[in-house]
């Protein structure tokens, strides 16, 4: 029997460290931070998962997908 799909609202919040040359974002679900994204200018995106693991992505969107996948696999 398959699980029903649940709609989950994901927020992307800019932190105080965010500037024109440095992007610093938090990915939030149900008022809990599930990951962070950091990028200098047009460089690679540093992705930090809730578990503390760090990865690298080519874009903000790809980094968000990594964080959401990890959340869906382990935390939901």
Image: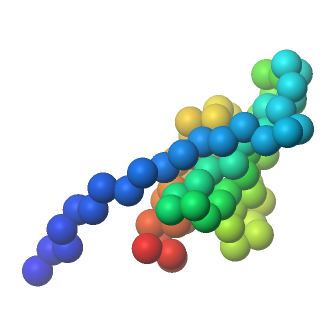
Would you say residue 39 is visible in this rendering? Answer: no
Which residue is outermost to the left?
1
- Can residue 6 be seen from the camera position used here? yes
Where is residue 19? Give x, y as percent.
86, 25
From this view, report whether residue 11 is shown above or below residue 20: below
Compared across the picture, whether 19 is left or right of 49 comes to right
Please, is residue 22 above or below residue 31 in the view?
Answer: above
Q: Indicate left or right for 23 with 26 as reference.
A: right
Q: Residue at point 15% right, 74% down?
A: 2
Above or below, 61 against 64 in this view is: above
In depth, the one of 34 and 58 nearer the eye is 34
Image spot of residue 16 (x, y percent)? 85, 39
Residue 44 drawn above or below residue 56: above
Q: In which quarter of the image is the N terminus?
A: bottom left
| Residue 49 percent coordinates (x, y) | 69, 62
Quadrant into which the C terminus falls: bottom left
Residue at the spot 74% in from the left edge and 57% down from the top edge: 48
């Amino acid at each position: 029997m398959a699980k029903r799909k649940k709609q989950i609202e994901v927020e992307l919040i800019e932190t105080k460290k965010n500037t024109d040359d440095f992007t610093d974002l938090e990915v939030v679900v149900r008022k809990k931070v599930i990951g962070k994204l950091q990028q200098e200018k047009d460089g690679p995106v540093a992705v930090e998962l809730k578990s503390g693991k760090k990865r690298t992505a080519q874009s903000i969107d790809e980094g968000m997908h990594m964080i959401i996948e990890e959340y869906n696999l382990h935390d939901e």
